[in-house]
């Protein structure tokens, strides 16, 4: 289970709308516990993909390091990433599976014709064979 502050989900939705028709991406900063993960910050990063940016996102190593440092500064952890799927469902693609890391959480936002839609969250299995959808709970105003 992943809990996301309503303000965090709104920030992701705004980012998806602003970058449409290309994919947006960013880090999810929060806290892990036995009951799941709680995300309190969405940290934007530039989509470093050099091709098919409307269907691909990439994270530069320096951006990954910046996310880790930002999380440390806030006494949080980098618990995952978010990205948008312009004009496609909020479900991971084969490309997403091939480039994901097990144990991190992947929030995907569908953006249809520039309008943010459904958001879902996924975790890659340890053997990297498949994503498993997880419960996404929105906390705070706008639940």
Image (cartoon, helix red, strand yellow):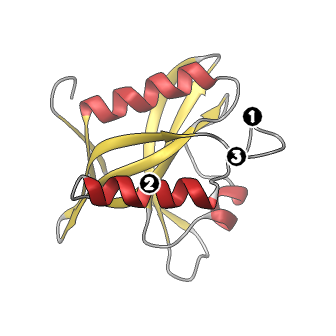
In this image, 22 relative to 7: left or right? right
Image coordinates of residue 20 in percent, x first then y, are: 65, 23
Q: Secondary structure at mark 2?
A: helix
Q: CA distance from mark 2 to mark 1?
A: 23 Å
Residue found at the far bottom of this picture: 127
Instruction: Mark 2 or mark 1: name the one nearer the start of the chain.
Output: 1
Residue designated by label 3: 48
As rendered, which of 10 and 116 lies closer to the eye?
10
Mark closer to the chain start, 2 or 3:
3
Q: Position of residue 68 (x, y in %)?
A: 41, 61
Q: Secondary structure at mark 3?
A: loop
Q: Residues within 10 Å of mark 3 (few under 14, many from 20)?
A: some
Q: Nearer the viewer, mark 2 or mark 1?
A: 2
100 or 62, which is in the foreground?
62
From the image, tell me which residue sits under label 2.
Answer: 67
Q: Is residue 107 visible?
A: no
Q: Is residue 123 left or right of residue 8?
A: right
Q: Residue at x 50, y 44 (%)?
A: 26
Q: Position of residue 54 (x, y in %)?
A: 74, 34
**Looking at the rendered structure, which numbered label has been put on residue 54?**
1
Identify whether 8 is placed above or below 91.
above
Rendered location of residue 44, percent (x, y): 48, 38
Q: Residues within 10 Å of mark 2 (few under 14, many from 20)?
A: many
Q: CA distance from mark 2 to mark 3?
A: 15 Å
Q: Quadrant of the C terminus?
A: top left
């Amino acid at each position: 289970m992943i809990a996301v502050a309503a303000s965090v989900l709104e920030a992701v939705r705004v980012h998806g709308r602003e970058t449409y028709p290309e994919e947006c991406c960013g880090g999810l900063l929060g806290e892990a516990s036995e009951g799941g993960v709680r995300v309190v910050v969405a940290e934007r990063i530039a989509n470093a993909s050099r091709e098919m940016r409307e269907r691909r996102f990439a994270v530069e190593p320096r951006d990954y390091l910046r996310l880790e440092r930002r999380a440390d500064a806030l006494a949080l952890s980098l618990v995952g990433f978010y990205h948008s799927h312009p004009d496609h469902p909020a479900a991971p693609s084969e490309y997403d599976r091939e480039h994901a890391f097990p144990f991190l959480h992947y929030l995907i936002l569908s953006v249809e014709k520039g309008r943010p839609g459904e958001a879902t969250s996924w975790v890659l299995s340890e053997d990297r064979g498949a994503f498993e959808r997880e419960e996404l709970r929105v906390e705070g105003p706008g639940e």
